[in-house]
Amino acid sequence: MIEVTRETKETQISVKLNLYGKGQAKIDTGVGFFDHMLEAFTKHAHIDMEVTCTGDTHIDDHHTVEDVGIVIGQALREAIYPVKSIERFGNATVVMDEASVTCDIDLSNRGFLVFELPIGGKVGEFDVELVEEFFRAFAFNLPLTLHLIYNRGKNKHHIIEAAFKALAVSLRRAVAINENAGIPSTKGVL
């Protein structure tokens, strides 16, 4: 199990992660909707993950959501790199009721984010603009190339949850063991 911690004046975070787990989650960030998304991500990525965060949520949830993305990305970086004997690429389209989101990833060791989800406002008390902040922090700290593309949907909760689940399935596929892959790059290193 990999453990990564981060302490700033704004947040204190601990992430424990097993890349090849059973989808078991213990999530407590103090942000209910975000916890729900991380639980869905953990379940569908088939990783085991514990996340605890104490943040300055009395101000807002921004630092908590972004910083958790940083630390989860760092923990996955430790678990995945250097890339060897895995598929490297993963993609999935996930539907949730009327919503459909496609995710494509490349464990390229290069951080990049394409975020095309037309969401704004709130889900309950959660500012949905923070979803992009999470995915950016995640992508650049892992690092990986991450594309999240909206296909259809109206309900913000459904669109966001489909995005987290699509990332989870894409990651699960990208880290699938393939002994024949060796180092899956013509460069010879990732």
Image: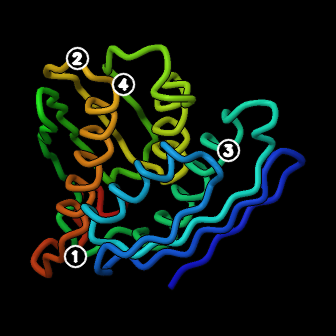
User: Where in the figure is residue 131, as x and y percent of width and height?
Assistant: 47, 32
Say which of marks 2 and 4 sits in front. 2
Residue at 14% from the left image edge and 81% from the top image edge: 179
| Residue 159 occupies quadrant | top left
User: Where in the figure is residue 37, as x and y percent of width and height?
Assistant: 40, 48
Residue at 73% from the left image edge and 31% from the top image edge: 60
Say which of marks 1 and 2 sits in front. 2
Separation of residues labelled 2 and 3 (CA atoms):
26 Å
Dot 3 corresponds to which residue? Answer: 64
The mark that comes first in sequence, 2 or 3, is 3
User: Where in the figure is residue 12, as x and y percent of width and height?
Assistant: 78, 58
Separation of residues labelled 3 and 4 (CA atoms):
20 Å
Say which of marks 3 and 4 sits in front. 3
The mark that comes first in sequence, 1 or 4, is 1
The mark that comes first in sequence, 3 or 4, is 3
User: Where in the figure is residue 76, as x and y percent of width and height?
Assistant: 46, 64
